[in-house]
Amino acid sequence: MSNLSVPAAAPARSEWWADAVVYQIYPRSFADGNGDGMGDLRGIVARLPYLERLGVDAIWLSPFYKSPQADGGYDVADYRQVDPLFGSLADFDAMLQDAHSRGMKVIVDLVPNHTSDEHVWFQAALASPPGSPERERYIFRPGRDEIPGSGDGNRAPNNWRSIFGGPAWSRIPAADGSPGDWYLHLFDTKQPDLNWENPEVQEEMRSVLRFWLDRGVDGFRVDVAHGMVKEKGLPDWDGVAAMVEGTAGTRPGPTPPGDAPGAHTDAEEPHRAVSPVYPPSPFFDQDGVHEIYRDWHRVLAEYGSDRMMVAEAWVEPAERLALYVRPDEMQQAFNFDFLLAGWDAERLAEAVEASLAAAASVGAPCTWVLSNHDTVRHPTRFGLSDPTAFPKGIAADDEQPDAALGLARARAATLVSLALPGSAYLYQGEELGLPEHTTLPAAARQDPTFFRTRGAETGRDGCRVPLPWSGDLPGYGFSDRLNGQAAQPWLPQPESFGPLAADRQDGVEGSTLELYRAALAFRFAHKLGRGAVSWADVHAPDSGLLAFHNGDVLVLANMGFASAPVPEGYAVALSSGPEPAEEWTAMREVPVDYAVYLLRK
Ligand code: NOJ
């Protein structure tokens, strides 16, 4: 580990996003304002005071657009409409205005790689012949080796696999009912990939950006930002064998809830879904995607200099990710290296150093993220026997975490991430220390990965469970009880949510909620988001100690096996542990699985 002082890019940028703390809202599960068991925009408005009090600078909303909800709304049927499940455009405008009046920025999700199969464009494509302009908005191909129009193409056009399991191609019937062309879907069958070589697609997405910018949004989180451009000729991928880790699922074939997303059937056997970070492939991280972001950068610039985009791009190494945040592209990219490092001092130190250096090389601020709606919540990951593990969901018959250990580590990791320069992303409920729901019954599951892998992948439902607002109310107060009644939350909550409900932690010293509030206030007071990191003398990641200076603060995180001394001349200003604040100044040792902020005495 080098001892260099890592340059921080953040101070060079004055825009709000350079050091913003952004709170991710997964609308289905945040707060239900109309008692139907599903979160909505009115529920968000009701909880804006809570977010203001928490001290976040911005909120990011996962999709709330019109959608059949085959992938929790990441299957958009109309980019300009709010799904009635969540409210109306008027509700959105009211929410935006309320957030702005509280000084909070609002980022919305943009899903440009694919639409829903229920989007008018895909419906028109199905009704139109091969080669038509309607088909050209998507990626339709005849089967491999097919004589065009002969219908004998029984093999998919190439060997690509869906990120959710199974083949990435589905076949549709021709006009006469015989087997017709295939279409590409890197995700579910209900999420056909758009053809980004088509100028009409490019123009439509510019128009969608302007639609939301005109309404006043402050930025976009760009879904699958590394996926829109595919290698010319759509060649087979030689990495596919590594991607297919197994064949059939280990659990009996599950049936999707409601309408099965099987309208277009997969022809082949299922396989395990794959790691989020891919080796080089013909469908991810193609150089051509950067042209799209240069174009969008210009669209945002029409609205001034403070609108932003953040890339969801699972690419490696950090230098490849930095390309997405060059000065004329996006403003931020999620730092998944940091998320994937787990509770491990060496891996975390490497991720911090590499990401700060890569971001600085292009003059962008770094981001820091520990959890989101696609990953097992970090208090649960850090409570597993391997706290660097990255399971694709956890089921009752999998290893169960040590909840107390995981929570202690999660609180410490949060102090680390909030002390780093740049922008931090929080996932709803992490401020309550919520664990993953690790014993959800199969019958309750909704994630398409569970169905497409026939249960081999447990999926992401466990991190999407509706939030507990009140420990004493049914559904832990997730739903407003209109006329005293409310439906059950759309996913069942575990009993462990009761004591973690927001009202049980509010004002309680030592609670995770109060720790987050204190850490955010400290970060703001000490301008940590605009600072610079240098490793401290005591930094020793090989013995589990991460230690860095940022401005006047010394941060120590103990991931080792023995207590670490508080360096001479310093006192604890904030600790991740449960002890009351009056005991901190007397602390001369940082226990294992703690992090502390130290100031000179
Ligand atoms: C990434 C999103 O975060 C995830 O939830 C979604 O399933 C895929 N992209 C497909 O849109």
Image: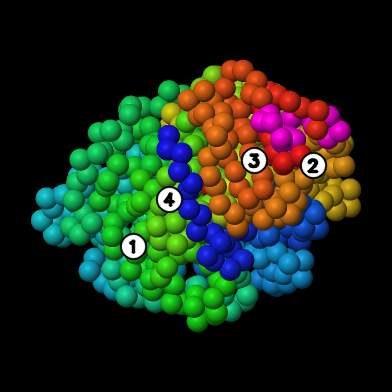
Render colour scheme: rainbow
Q: How far apart in space, not on screen, are marks 3 and 4 (Cα)?
A: 20 Å
Please tell me which residue lies in front, 402 or 362.
Answer: 362
Query: Mark 3 against mark 1, which lies toward the viewer?
Result: 3
State the extent of the magenta-drawn residues as a range.
566-584
Q: Which residue is label 4 attached to?
A: 357
For disc 4, the neighbor class at 10 Å (few under 14, some 14 to 19, many from 20) is many
Q: Amino acid at mark 2?
A: Glu
* Pointer 1 residue Cβ closer than 8 Å to ligand 1: no
Q: How far apart in space, not on screen, are marks 3 and 2 (Cα)?
A: 21 Å
Q: Amino acid at mark 1?
A: Val
Tell me which residue sits at (65%, 20%) in the image.
Answer: 563
For disc 3, the neighbor class at 10 Å (few under 14, some 14 to 19, many from 20) is many
Q: Which residue is label 2 attached to?
A: 514
For disc 1, the neighbor class at 10 Å (few under 14, some 14 to 19, many from 20) is some
In screen coordinates, is 251 left or right of 277? right
Marks 3 and 2 close (CB-CB < 8 Å): no
* Label located before the other in sequence (3 or 2): 2
* Label located before the other in sequence (4 or 2): 4
Q: Amino acid at mark 4?
A: Ala
Q: Which residue is label 1 attached to?
A: 289
Tell whether position 263 is magenta: no
In screen coordinates, is 589 left or right of 274? right
* x, y percent for residue 174: 26, 59
Query: Mark 4 against mark 2, which lies toward the viewer?
Result: 4
* Pointer 3 residue Cβ closer than 8 Å to ligand 1: no
Residue 90 tag number: none
Marks 3 and 4 close (CB-CB < 8 Å): no
